[in-house]
Amino acid sequence: MIISASRRTDIPAFYSDWLFNRIKEGYALVKNPMNYSQIRKVEINPDAVDCMVFWSKNPAPMLGKLNLLKDYSYYFQFSLNLYENDIETMLPGRENLLDTFKKLSDYTGPRKVIWRYDPVLINDKYTVKYHTDNFSLIAGKIKNHTNKVTFSFIDLYKKIERAAKENGMRELTEEEKNVLAENFSLSARENNLLIDTCTENIDLAKYGIKNARCIDSELISEISGKDLPYRKDKNQRLLCGCAASVDIGEYNTCLNNCLYCYANHSRSLVLEKAEKHNVLSPIITGNI
């Protein structure tokens, strides 16, 4: 079993103590996101778990505790966009996040920290030129601390329509996507990084960009030493190449408060749920 921790919330940033308690207890309880009255028990032990995949914008709280994962194979999907706090309102500053990325890589090794430049959003401030320059800047600073970058263009989900309108965000044109893809690919090659893209319905092969498998059975086989068969995750979007996994997170619990977030309905709901978090509970919010 592959554990995803998590597409639904930032477990490394806000719930790592809860996670390590779950590892100690040997299980977690997870609400069905489509029906919260249904709860699944997920075993967490070295025999049951082939790999853990962590998704985070700020895994700094885990840096001093990674030794607690010594019995597990794992890697990180680290989103590093470095938008200012008008978009990523609660994240630490640029230098802090770059330092965290490097420290994490120094501990795990570069192949276990994948850089995500995700999502690429466009408005009057964050232009094509901005992203071209910003991507190149970040790539140069972390080129010795990762082997790969995955990027994606923003999807304006209904739940972020208001924030998008208030901040002038819009969908990218096909021309803009091609210009950015070409520039990103050039920067990646200059910094010896592999590059792919996450669930994009546009052919970027001419720039040497493939479709990503963010939960990657080949990488997991390499890290774990186990020959794992690839089974596509039927619960993800059609274009998603990820292997099947079990997500132990919960929507409406991420406190990063990024304006492009698809995982939260409202800030008030997130704060309400955060008040119910108990690090000793088998479930992220509340008790059973």
Image (cartoon, grey):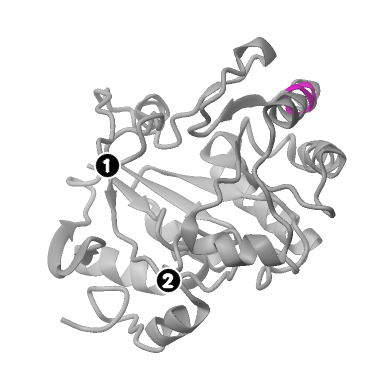
Q: Please, what secondary structure does the residue beneath circle 1 have?
A: loop
Left or right position of 207 against 9: right
Question: Residue 15, which numbered label?
Answer: 2
Judge the density around disc 1: few (<14), some (14-19), many (≥20) Cα neighbours within 10 Å. Answer: few
Residue 36 locus on image (x, y percent) = 20, 70
Q: Residue at x 36, y 37 (%)?
A: 237
Question: Residue 147, which numbered label?
Answer: none
Q: In the figure, residue 142 lies in which quadrant? A: top right
Residue 90 locus on image (x, y percent) = 65, 73
Badge 1 or badge 2: first in the primary sequence: 2
Q: Nearer the viewer, mark 1 or mark 2?
A: 1
Depth check: give the residue in front, 163 or 144.
Answer: 163
* Residue type, mark 1 in image: Asn
Q: Residue at x 58, y 70 (%)?
A: 257
Residue 4 locus on image (x, y percent) = 35, 50
Depth check: give the residue in front, 100 or 208.
Answer: 208
- Whether residue 71 appears in this view of the structure is no
Is residue 254 part of the magenta span, yes or no? no
Callout 1–callout 2 Cβ contact below 8 Å: no
Predominant SS of the magenta segment: helix
Q: Residue at x 28, y 35 (%)?
A: 233
Q: Residue at x 71, y 69 (%)?
A: 92
Q: In the figure, residue 217 lies in which quadrant? A: top left
* Residue type, mark 2 in image: Tyr
* Residue that mark 1 sits on: 235
Depth check: give the residue in front, 22 or 138.
Answer: 138
Relative to 155, does residue 62 appear above or below in the rendering? below
Depth check: give the residue in front, 49 or 30.
Answer: 30
Residue 120 locus on image (x, y percent) = 67, 44
Q: Quadrant of the N terminus?
A: top left
**Region in magenta:** 182-186
Q: Residue furthest top?
A: 206
